[in-house]
Image (tube, grey):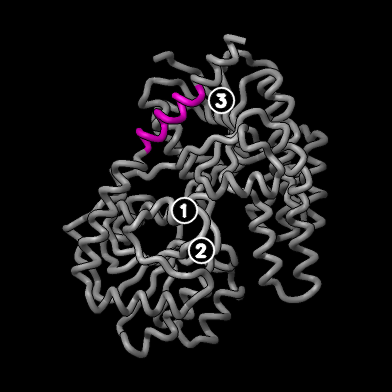
Amino acid sequence: MRKFKIAFLSYRSAPFSGGQGIYVYELSRAFKNLGHEVDIISGPPYPKLADGINLIKLPGLDLFSTFNFRDRLNLFFNKENKDFDDYYEFFIALIGGFPEMRTFGNRAKNYLSTRKEYDFVIDNQSLSYSMIKIQEEFPLFQVIHHPIPRDKEYELKYAKGIVKKTFIRSWYSFLKMQSKVAPKMHNIISPSKSSKNDIQKYFHVDSSKIHVIPNGIDTGIFKPNLVISKKPFKLITTASADVPLKGLDFTLRAIAIAKDKYPLINLVVIGKPRSGGHTERLISKLGIDEFVSFKTNLTNQEVSDEYASSQIAIVSSLYEGFGFPVGEAMACAVPLIATDVASIPEITGPYAEMVAPESHEDIFNSLNNIFQNYDHYLKKANLGRDHILQNFSWSVIANTYIDHISSILTSHADI
């Protein structure tokens, strides 16, 4: 097999928040293990990377590390040799927009313009105008985990008040750019059939340009740990609190019902709520403060240990382009309750209890069923781990990427 030099673009790659940092870390490591050379070209926050993978930093202002205006001013004025992108980034953020994708794309284009040694470029979801220019110089593979208009829809659906909705529309103003760029991309990789269908629907992309390759799960870290005892009635969920798309509200409402029948029930949320935000207010309103706790900034191993001590995992998302928490819970052989939406059933197969979205009653009923017949559901969870090992290990996924990319490069070379 030919060995490639890969430029892997990621406009932000936070290692402990959301799936982007996980995706960058795991796929780049899997490429390296296959013998390929990988440069991660990233804006802040920067990723954690495996040994032997080069990180090229393209520093922006990192304005979203804080929402304090004075701190943002300091970040702006302390940046040396400011250019147009720095000014654009500051003023668009000032009026409530999210400019990082566009400005990162410009910086990546400028960086790559003087370097011709890469065999191909992978862009992780930025869909910036500069990707159109980059694909004129390099074979470019645009990864779209899911079309962000779905996020906007759910944010607006659950937002209250004109001011909040105005802020949401301003934040998602980058979608105008993405909707123009996506149809012009020659090669798109998406992690699920559901996501592919939505990319066609929202971005009007020809289906022939979209190739489905699932994301992977680190089955070496996310695995059963028999040394750790399960805590009775401990539940676990991974959710970005205060993000409606993740559906945490419905899990919390299920806990409010379940606590009366199972007074020892405890939900651990891997995520961080916004201080004084919607999630904290809902927990207080439901009277479940003592039944819910939050943990954040955990390593993958620490998250795996949390799964090991949990009796049930819950994923109540309203949409997932690819649900890492679904695969991670299954890899740990934890009985799983998950919403029957988007990509989730593509991952679970028949090995999870599927519930309707936005239904705390379904979540409660599934909790009750599992608690009443736990051994049966534990056997099902062990079969679920086998399913993940066979279909979603990162080594399998990385080989699929390389095979697909090689076939595209070969077909283009023959023209």
Q: Residue at x 67, y 36 (%)?
A: 206
Q: Identify the element where label 2 is drawn.
A: loop
Q: Nearer the viewer, mark 3 or mark 1?
A: 1
Q: Name the residue under label 2.
A: 317
In the picture, residue 389 is in which quadrant?
top left
Bin the neighbour count of mark 1 within 10 Å (Cα to Cα): few under 14, some 14-19, many 20 and up: many
- In the rendered image, residue 175, in percent from the top left (x then y), is placed at 74, 48
| Residue that protrudes farthest toward the left in the picture | 227
Q: Identify the element where label 3 is drawn.
A: strand
Mark 3 → mark 1, Cα distance in angstroms: 25 Å
Q: Name the residue under label 1.
A: 323
Earlier along the polypeptide chain: callout 1 or callout 2?
A: 2
Quadrant of the rendering where the N terminus is positioned: top left
Q: Which amino acid, by three-letter code, is at mark 2?
A: Ser
Whether residue 92 appears in this view of the structure is yes
Q: Are the residues at dot 3 and dot 2 in contact (C-beta closer than 8 Å)?
A: no
| Vertical placement of residue 171 versus 213, above or below | below
- In the rendered image, residue 63, in percent from the top left (x then y), is placed at 69, 50
| Vertical placement of residue 359 versus 13, above or below | below
Q: Residue at x 32, y 55 (%)?
A: 330
Q: In this view, does 298 lie to the left or right of 145?
A: left
Earlier along the polypeptide chain: callout 3 or callout 1?
A: 3
Q: Are the residues at dot 1 and dot 2 in contact (C-beta closer than 8 Å)?
A: yes
In the picture, residue 33 is in which quadrant?
top left
In the picture, residue 36 is in which quadrant?
top left
Q: Mark 3 points at which residue?
A: 7
Instruction: Give yes or no for residue 411 being in the magenta stretch.
Output: no
Residue segment shown in magenta: 394-405
Instruction: Give yes or no for residue 400 being in the magenta stretch.
Output: yes
Bin the neighbour count of mark 3 within 10 Å (Cα to Cα): few under 14, some 14-19, many 20 and up: many
Quadrant of the rendering where the C terminus is positioned: top right
